Amino acid sequence: MLGNLGFIRMGEIDDLIIKVSPFYKKRKEAQDKGAEIRIPSNEYRLIYDSSSETLEPLYFWILDFMQKNFKKVEKLVDNFASSPGSGHFSELQGKASQMQQEASRVLGTVNNILKGVLNLIYDLKEFKIRLSHYEAADSKDKGTSEAGILALKQIWMDKVDMQRGQGSLNALSSGNLQFVTLRDAFMIVNSIKEVDDLDLNDRVKRILKPRIQEFFEWKERSHQELKKRYEIEKIYLKSQVSALKLNTRWAKPYLLAAQKLSQSQDLMSDAALVTAFNTIILQLTIVGIQALPVKEMIEDKKIPKEFRKMKNLREYNKFVVIDFKFRGIPSKSGQHYTFGGRADVEFKSYGLTKDEIEMIKLEQEKSDLKTAMSLVEGMTEGSLAQMQVDIDEILRDKKPGEKDEDGEDTNPFSAIFSIFKSEKKEDEKDEDDETKKQKKYEKLQKLVKKPENYAEKYLRNVAEAYAYIDCFNVYDIYKKGHGMPAFPFPWKDDKEAKAPLSTSEEIFGFGRTRR
C-alpha cells in the first residue's frame, strides 16, 4: 500500500514506473529511438488561474470523485514552500520550532528515564546471578549444591567477614597468627557437627564454629532480603518501562508535526518563490488504484471467456496519477490562510501489476531523503534492541518483542518508531527490518522481471485502456461540471483494448494497425 513518503518530487513517480516496469522501460527505449509511443498512456493538463479562488475546492472535488471510482486513493506527495519574506513563512516556522522544542523536551525526559532503566537492568542482572548461587545451594544434586555453597561462602568472606579486619578468616589464615588451615576448613564444613569431626586443634575449632553458624544464618536471611529487593526493583523497572513507553508516545505527534511542517528544499529553489514576495508553492500528488475484475469482465464479455480457465495470472491494476502544483498568494483570514492563485493539474494513466506498485514503493523509500527520525532510529536501533532483550528476560523470561497476556507489545520504543515502520508479523520479529526489506525487494525484482505470457500482455492492455478511460473521465467531468470548454473523447465509443502482437507479427511487421 502506497502512503505519504515525505519530500517526493512531482513527476518522480513517472520516472520510477519506467525504471521498475519492464513494459514501460521497453516503451521508453522505443520512444527514444523515434517510435510514436506515449508514456504515460495518456496525459491531460488543466490550468486554472484565479486570484480569488483557492486550491482546496479543486483538490477535494477531484479527490472525492476518485474515491468514488477507485478502490484505493493514496497521497504520494504533500510538499510546500513559502517565500522567506512572507507572513505565512514566519508563522509556519514558528509552529515548527514549537513542535521541535516540545519534542526535544519530551525526548530529554525519555533520555533521563532511559539512564535509570539501564542502571536497573544492570542491578537486576547482578541480583539474578547472586540468586542463582542460592538456588544452586538448595539443589538436590550434590555437585550443584556443593558448588552453590562454595560460591556463597566466598561471597560471605569477601563481603561480610572481611569487615572484621584483622579478625577475618582471610586475615587470620595469612597473618602472623598462622591459622593456615582455618580458611580451608571453613570451605569444607557445612555444619557445626562437622567441625567436631575435623582433625584440627581446639583453637581453630573455637574460631570456626561461630563463623559457620553465622554463615548459615546470613545465607537464610540474605536470600530472603535479596529476593525481596529483586522483586521490588523488578516492579520498579516495569513502572519505568511503562513511563518510557508513555513519553515516547507523547513525543511521536510532535516529531511527526515538525517533520510535516518542514519546507521542501527543492521547492525553495523554484524561480516563482521570490524572497521578498508574499508567495507560496504547493505540490500534491494522488494516485487511484483499481484491480481489474477479471471474472466480472468475462461475464460482461469484455474479455474472452478462455481467461476463465487460466490460473496464476498476475493481478493488473488501473493506475491513475494526478499531480497538483499550486502557486498562490497567502491571505490571512482569521487564524488561517487562504490561497488564491494558479493551479496546474496533470492527469496521467498507466496499467501496472500489483508487484510493480509494491516495487515502486520500495524504490521510493530507497531514494527518499532520510528524515530526522530515521537518523535517530539508525543510531539507536541496535542498542535499544539489545536492551529489549534484557527487559524481556528480566520481566517475563520471554523472547524479545513477544506480547504479554493482554496482547501489548513490551518494546518501549515501538511507539516512536512506528512512524516509519510498518507492522511486523509474529514470525518476522527476530529478523532485522532492513534485511526483510532487502529480501522483499529481491523477491519483487524477480517477479517483476518475469516475462509476461500472451494472456498477461492482453490483461496489461486492458488495464491500460480502462485507466485511460478513467483518467479522461476525471479530467472531462471536472471541466464540464465547472462550465469549462471540453472536447469529445478521442475514440468514438470506447478506447479499445487490443490484443498484443504475436512474435511473428512483431518480427515481420504484420498487424501494425492493431496497436
Image (tube, rainbow, N blue to C red):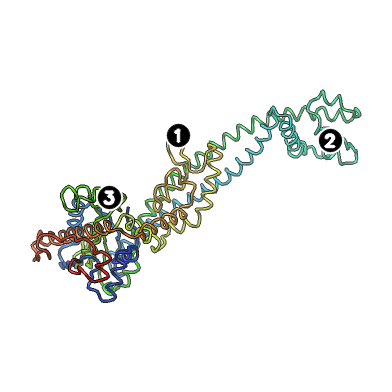
Mark 3 against mark 2, which lies toward the viewer?
3
Relative height, residue 304 to residue 7 (above, below)? above
Q: Position of residue 22 (x, y in %)?
A: 33, 64
Image position of 272 (left or right of 232): left
Q: Position of residue 209 (x, y in %)?
A: 82, 27
Q: Residue at x 79, y 37 (%)?
A: 164
Q: Position of residue 501 (x, y in %)?
A: 24, 64
**SS for dot 3:** loop
**Dot 1 and dot 3 residues touching (CB under 8 Å):** no
Amino acid under disc 2: Asp
Relative height, residue 176 to residue 16 (above, below)? above
Task: Give the residue number, with chain letter if any, for mark 1.
Answer: 405
Q: Residue at x 12, y 62 (%)?
A: 479
Amino acid under disc 1: Glu
Task: Give the residue number, with chain letter if any, for mark 3.
Answer: 310
Relative height, residue 59 to residue 136 (above, below)? below
Q: Residue at x 43, y 59 (%)?
A: 372
Q: Which mark is residue 184?
A: 2
Q: Is residue 346 visible?
A: yes
Q: Residue at x 30, y 49 (%)?
A: 311
Label 1 packing within 10 angstroms: few (<14), some (14-19), many (20+): few
Image position of 41 (left or right of 395): left
What is the spatial separation of the Cα atoms under label 3 and label 2, in whole angstroms? 85 Å
Mark 1 against mark 2, which lies toward the viewer?
1
What is the spatial separation of the Cα atoms under label 1 and label 2, in whole angstroms? 50 Å
